[in-house]
Amino acid sequence: QVQLGESGGGLVQPGGSLRLSCAASGSIFSINDMGWYRQAPGNQREMVATITSGGSAKYADSVKERFTISRENAKKMVYLQMNSLKPEDTAVYYCNADITLWSRRNRAYWGQGTQVTVSS
C-alpha cells in the first residue's frame, strides 16, 4: 500500500511564502513524475507544477516565477516553494505521484490535500 502525506499549508498574508512538502511511503519500487495540483471552491482541480524523476519541471502560467517545485528521490519527497502568494492562490493543494510498485504495477496516487489560504 502506498500513501502520500502532505504538510506545510496554512494561512499567509498576500506577498508571503509557504513551503509544501509531500512524502511517499509504502511498497514503492520507483517514483516517476511527481506534482502538485490545487482545487479552489467551485473550480476544477488544476495542475500547479510537475517534476520528472530527472528533475525537469513544468509550471502553470499563473505560478511561473513565483513557485518552485523540487524533489529528493532518495527520501521519496517532493516540495513546492511558494513565494509572492496572492489571494487567488487560495486552494486545497494536492500531491500527486506516478508510482511503480514492487509488483511492477503502475498507477497514480494522491495525497489527502493541505489547505493554503492567502488573506490579509
Image (cartoon, rainbow, N blue to C red):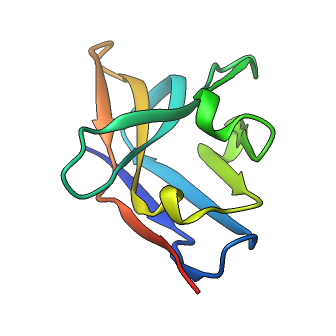
Q: Nearer the viewer, residue 7 or 101?
A: 7
Point 66% across, 50% down: residue: 79
Point 60% across, 61% down: residue: 20
Q: Please say if 11 is above or below 44.
A: below
Point 72% across, 34% down: residue: 64
Of the 4 image quadrants, the one containing the N terminus is top left
Left or right of 39, for residue 70:
right
Point 33% across, 12% down: residue: 104
Q: In x, y percent, where is residue 88? A: 50, 57
Q: In which quarter of the image is residue 109?
A: top left
Q: In x, y percent, where is residue 81? A: 73, 55
Q: In x, y percent, where is residue 42? A: 18, 52
Q: In x, y percent, where is residue 43? A: 24, 45
Of the 4 image quadrants, the one containing the C terminus is bottom right
Q: In which quarter of the image is residue 14?
A: bottom right
Q: Please say if 21 is above or below 64.
A: below
Q: In which quarter of the image is residue 61?
A: top right
Q: Nearer the viewer, residue 93 or 101?
A: 93
Q: Which of 90 and 104 is in front in this view?
A: 90
Left or right of 45, for residue 33:
right
